[in-house]
Amino acid sequence: MANKKENGYLTSKEIRAISKENRRITGEMEKKWKRKNVPESEYITKMRDPQNAVEFDDLHSYFYTDSGVVKSVDGVSFDVPIGKTVGIVGESGCGKSVTSLSLMQLLQRPQGQIVSGEIRLNRGGKVYNIANTPQEIMQDLRGNAISMIFQEPMTSLNPVFRIGDQVDEVIALHEGKGKSKEEIRRQTIEALELVGIANSEGVAKMFPHELSGGMRQRVMIAMALACHPRVIIADEPTTALDVTIQAQILDLLRDLKDRINASIMLITHDLGVIAEMADYVVVMYAGRVVEKGTAEEIFYHPSHPYTLGLMASKPVVGRKVSELYSIPGKVPNPINMPDYCYFRDRCELKLGCCDGEYPHEIRLSDTHVVSCYRYYEEHKDEAKMNTNSNLIKTAEIAASREEVKEDA
Amino acid sequence: MPNSDYILEVKDLKKYFPIKGGYLDRKVGSVKAVDGVTFSLPRGTTMGLVGESGCGKTTTGRTILRLAGEKTGGSVLFEGKEVYDLDKKQMRALRTKMQIIFQDPFSSLSPRLPVGEIIGEAVKEHNIVPKAEYEEYIDKVMDECGLQPFHKSRYPHEFSGGQRQRICIARALALNPDFVVCDEPVSALDVSIQAQIINLLNKLQEERHLSYLFISHDLSVVEHISDSVGVMYLGNLVEYGKKEDIFRNPLHPYTKALFSAIPNPDPHAKMNRVVLEGSIPSPANPPSGCKFHTRCPYATERCKTELPIQREMEKGHFVSCHEAK
């Protein structure tokens, strides 16, 4: 890595050297990706567990920028079971969206590349390894097998086309072979009705600006579901919406998921939304999974200090605190990641052993996995000593909530 | 004699925007963005204003600051003086006393000015401090808001969202205001950054005895930061009172629905949700009578015709609903 001057800026000479190297690396990857007639053996694999819709296995997605390589996703593994909702939480820049974009192969090429690891997509008969799937095949998978609901309904719809035409386009592209315009339009109207748009024929003739935010988000969902995908990625689907509309959209998503037995990957930073929707939760920090488990495990027994910090920093209606907890410091520079635990410098519960290499995953139960030295067998005693923190209280409050529930 | 305990008194404030169209671009109607809002804000406290988007929260904030052109009706008394009666020169002087922090820290900072100038521009303009102390003063303000002195020569694009919001806060506070309108200051930020900014706002309030009008759609944030809460629906303040009263005992059906829609970070929590059908009606053509009757589960014939007046149900707890008991 190039020498950093004191002010943190690179010289233009250094930048030129980096971008030359980047072009060499990404050029090779692009060539591979654009090949035609790739033999199936290169991208067809087997699922570890056929009950899963998607398996992420040690995924690494990097961005080759002019100031260095940004390891946005750095060894992420988790499963999305069929018919379940997996929530991914984390701050912006932690790699949530990049993980999901990798699954769609929608990373900004050529800078953004899946460098290593596997993403296995279960498509009934065949299992695809998305990391190696060439462009041609990918176009068939997108929309049909996986589809995505984007974050901002305001900017993801094209303002110069009518709603109906935009949904038509999706259907024509993916399922349109041999269908007449009328048939496609009928399917569009059905898709709009499915998401609870009452005046669907009227709405199909409208432009996006004539609709409210909630309605636009419904249109986005209709577009995503138009071709009956098995996996739906919802990237902050309700962040731009009001609470009352958010409640409507969440109800809709839950209802639709059950009806078409799809899996949802729900990306959000709102823990409330996650608790309501998700069966499994994955907590990400700086490109890695720090904790994953079922929703109950994460919310009643949060274990990683970062998860605890997230919970403590969110104000909750009905819970009084004089001052909100805020995680000190900030996310490390993604270009120069430290070689110890990424959270160590912000962690209030750090131990002496945290200076060592990045902690590996520790299993607390069959489903609950955490990457933290506090749960290593040999450090458990030390962890018990260091309990003088607000964070521990948060953990206790969380655990006590479950006891209350069990009593009731 | 106005009550000097209150820094701000708003009475029956109205702001309509004209809709132009047709032949010769004549006025064909109006959007009733703010339609009769009454509240008063004691000095050194925070009032939270909640509601769905399009309900007039932001317009209320801007109208109070006289940033949205002329008001349509009602009065805004700032420290006992009617804001809209001041001439240009007096208004200019008053601007330093009332400031605003905007929602989106990405678009409310000029990309072409270094941070030091963004914060200092108004300080120079209003001669807040003598020239000799200027640099020192900017450093001090930046330090209070958690920014480093070397940030001064950097440009906004070099900062993260949370830090940009700190710059916006520093810009507002550099003028030594008494009253700050915070228009969704944390909506665009991550949870952990949100907590930092909320704590910062609280700290600054204590140190400088500031009064805030805190506009947000996030009820949990509003509950945390506010002393009193106002709930707006379609230009009306439907419920208003002390935070404890509103959250413990919401009276207006809209407030109840709003509260039940908050997602609870507890997977086992049973939801007794009052789900509101449809979306907010157009403010250009609001429903007759109580504006909420089209979505209200308890609406009666009376609600369709008669506009409810604001009633005081408990001490300091006002609600505009015929059916509230």
Image (spheres, grey):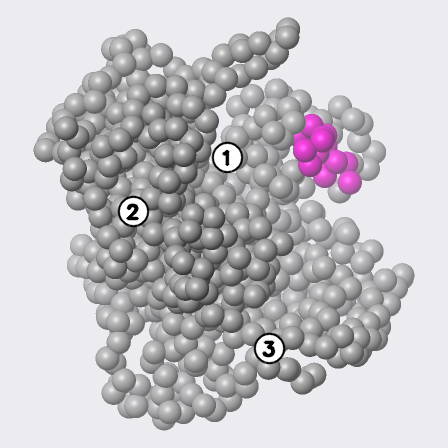
Viewer-closest of B277 and B111 = B111
Viewer-closest of B322 and B150 = B150
Residue receiving disc 2: B178
Q: Are marks 2 and 3 on the same chain?
A: no
- Name which residue lies at 34% across and 52% down: B176
Q: Which residues are magenta?
A: A158-173
- Name which residue lies at 74% across and 66% down: A111
Residue B325, can we see it?
yes
Residue B122: image location, x then y, percent:
46, 49
Magenta-highlighted stretch: main secondary structure? helix
Query: Mark 1: which secondary structure?
Result: helix
Q: Is residue A169 magenta?
A: yes
Residue B289: image location, x then y, percent:
31, 13
Question: Callout 3 environment at 10 Å: few (<14), some (14 to 19), or many (20+)?
Answer: few
Q: Is residue B102 magenta?
A: no
The mark lying in front, picked from 3 and 1, is 3
- Mark 3 or 1, nearer chain start: 3
User: Amino acid under label 1?
Assistant: Gly
Furthest residue in direction top, as rendered = B23
Residue receiving disc 1: A214
Viewer-closest of A191 and B218 = B218
The mark lying in front, picked from 1 and 2, is 2
The mark lying in front, picked from 2 and 3, is 2
User: Residues under labels 1 and 2: Cα distance?
Assistant: 37 Å
Residue B270, can we see it?
no
Q: Quadrant of the N terminus of chain B?
A: top left
- Name which residue lies at 51% across and 61% down: B116
- Name which residue lies at 26% across and 76% down: A389
